Amino acid sequence: MGNNTFNIWAIKLETVKLWADLKNMPDENISVLLDEKRVFKPSEKFVNETNVKQWMDEHNIKNLEELHKKAEDREWFWKEISKDLVEWYKPYDKVVEWEAPWVKWFVGAKYNIVHDALDKHVKSWRKNKVAFIFEGEPGDVQKLTYNDLYIEVNKLANALKKLDVKKGDRVGIYMPMLPELPIAMLACAKIGAIHSVVFSGFSALAFRDRVNDCEAKVVITCDGFWRRGRKVYLKQQSDEALEKAPGVKHVIVFKRTGDAVPWTPGRDVWWHDLVYGMPKECESEKLDANDPLFFLYTSGTTGKPKGIIHAHGGYAVGTAYTLKWVFDLKDEDIWWCAADIGWITGHSYIVYAPLILGATSVIYEGAPNYPQPDRWWALIEKFNVTTLYTSPTSIRLFMKYGEEWIKKHDLSTLRLLGSVGEPINPEAWIWYYKYIGNEKCQIMDTWWQTETGHCVISPLPITPLKPGSATRPLPGLSADVYNEEGKPVQNAGGNLVLTHPWPGMLRGIYKNPERYKETYWSKFKDTYLAGDVTRKDSDGFFWIQGRADDVLNVSGHRIGNSEVESALVSHPMVAEAAVIGKPHEIKGESITSYVILKGHITPSDELRNELREHVGKEMGKIARPDEIWFVSDVPKTRSGKIMRRVIRAKALGKDVGDTSTLANPEAVDEIGKAK
Ligand code: WT7
């Protein structure tokens, strides 16, 4: 086992080196900057004006080291931090209660996150402040103030009650990037219902699985939306999903495109009809701070996606703290987190944290390169965006288009940048710094996961940066790198672990406590296993190298190898499949599959396309394999386990190591030939 793991690390390290080998750099200066191994420091003026520096001054803390040290008193730290961010209906008795692996935060408090996201703002000067600036792909713009949002949420919350949605009930939400998506989420939260949002790019079948797993009784969707100039007919997809979802009693449909949609009378209801005449006030349910707020499904190594549970109180504190400190969010900012709300990044940093802080955020419906590769830069210029949070995949895509698209626009309002989802290669970092940030914006490379709820390893705007490193755990949060024996290691690859509970920590996997314990808590005692291979350098900086397990990271999104394999095998012509990830210049990783066809089926390019589309239909477009190779066998152990590690090594032309334990060593050659 130990050995295998090390081989995986070797491959992952190769991946990192591959980045450095990328030759098509647009500018020679970038290589020069890289060679300098520069540490990027923020200006003194910038530092002095940050939220974190202000907090340090108020607490007589002189420097970053002292801040980290003081924050080790976690009880004290989270008490101080939460004071500025949230308002409880009833104060907590205890900051944290930890009975590994179960945690409770702000024990005894009565709370609802919607109080901080909306209710408190409409009683303040922020009532008429813009909460969301929305731009649709066709160019339509809508601005919603905190008061607008408050009224829309209340009306929908009242409507949900009318449909008999109660505290603890689950609501499945299948919606694109429209303001109605946060409205739907907040309406659920307001009445204590649990939302389970499914990314609108996922297929009908993926939506079905998730709706059934969480036993949703109501679904919220829309007729369709715009993507790359075309319409996506989401209601049709939703109907297909619900053909086999007997628990769903009502479907609320928001009208976006105005096209005719299939309709099931008695079940389906238009959003606008439902909320018509509903009262504009709806009291937020006074919940326990540890009551669940939402489920969000994410991939693991085996079986079905896991329904990660997050709760109201701790999640509110953790997300708001990180947005305020890492992204230095202030009232004057125009914040743009360019992720999709269907993923955790959007839940935390488009919906909840920005609203808690009373910020103004941008929501954009469409594709980044539509109608031209400068759509994002046009948006930044048009709305005076000050802070942009995006993924390395997007950055690499824009690098490919070239700087001329950027130079057409005035991006001088930007003051801070962020990156999330996958390791950012130093080339992309420098390019982001130079061309988007104009060499004046620090880059916050934030490491976190669906499970962590908020950023964990990340710079603060006052941290000196090394391109490619997410730097260190934030104050109050703690991570380390352990070897297989559970000993901390430095300057060597190891397992990334979180050594203490944190406020936004997941509260389990829905209906599966055993899987929760097994996945995260069984390798090291009372210590959270993140599943990433990481190296800690001599300065204590963390370099995340990628997943340690059989989970792919495609464009910053998690996809289980085994999920793609089962999607392939569900095709009637496929007998067996093995899926691996290969380094990809833009997407980080691409999906490569080796397929064994049944009996007399003849391989063909048509079949290849058919299988690709089949996976798209089963899972969603993002999971479609980039490469499909037909083989007669794949390397397996004697117990029949597919050796993805060996396949990957062979496919990348690396040393496959010892194959003597394989049941069918000759299959390795076939992989080589398929290449
Ligand atoms: C996995 C979590 C957190 C929101 C988006 C992804 C990878 C995430 C970084 C980063 C290197 C990163 C890890 C992690 N990851 N951020 N800054 N540097 N890797 O959420 O789908 O739950 O995936 O994304 O592998 O485990 P997710």
Image (cartoon, rainbow, N blue to C red):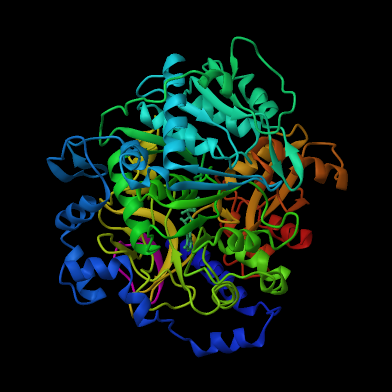
Q: Nearer the viewer, residue 26 or 2?
A: 26
Secondary structure that dominates the magenta span: loop
Position of residue 629 in the picture relative to residue 561 (left or right): right
- Tell me residue 369's x, y (percent): 71, 57
**Is residue 110 highlighted in magenta?**
no
558 or 464, which is in the foreground?
464
Specify start and end residues of the magenta stretch as a single range: 484-496
**Image point (77%, 52%), residue name:** 629
Residue 182 is left or right of residue 664, and the answer is left
The location of residue 406, given as percent across then percent down, is 66, 70
Q: Residue at x 46, y 47 (%)?
A: 130
At 69% from the left and 79% from the top, the residue drawn is 26
User: Residue 285, relative to residue 105: is it above or below?
Assistant: above
Q: Is residue 304 visible?
A: no
- Looking at the picture, how far across and down is residue 304, in whole percent? 52, 36
Residue 55 picture quarter: bottom left
Examine the rendered structure and indicate whether residue 358 appears above or below residue 114.
Answer: below
Q: Quadrant of residue 77?
A: bottom left
* Left-right relation of 326 to 552: left
Q: Quadrant of the N terminus?
A: bottom left
Residue 541 seen in this snapshot: yes
The residue lying furthest to the top in this view is 266
Residue 661 in the image: state x and y as whole percent.
Answer: 56, 57
Mark count: 0
Is 493 contained in the magenta span? yes
Query: Picture quarter containing residue 516?
Result: top left
Query: Which residue is most to the left?
Result: 93
From the viewer's side, name the closer residue of 395 and 641: 395
Q: Which quarter of the rendering shows the C terminus? A: bottom right
Note whether 615 is above or below 261 in the view shown. below
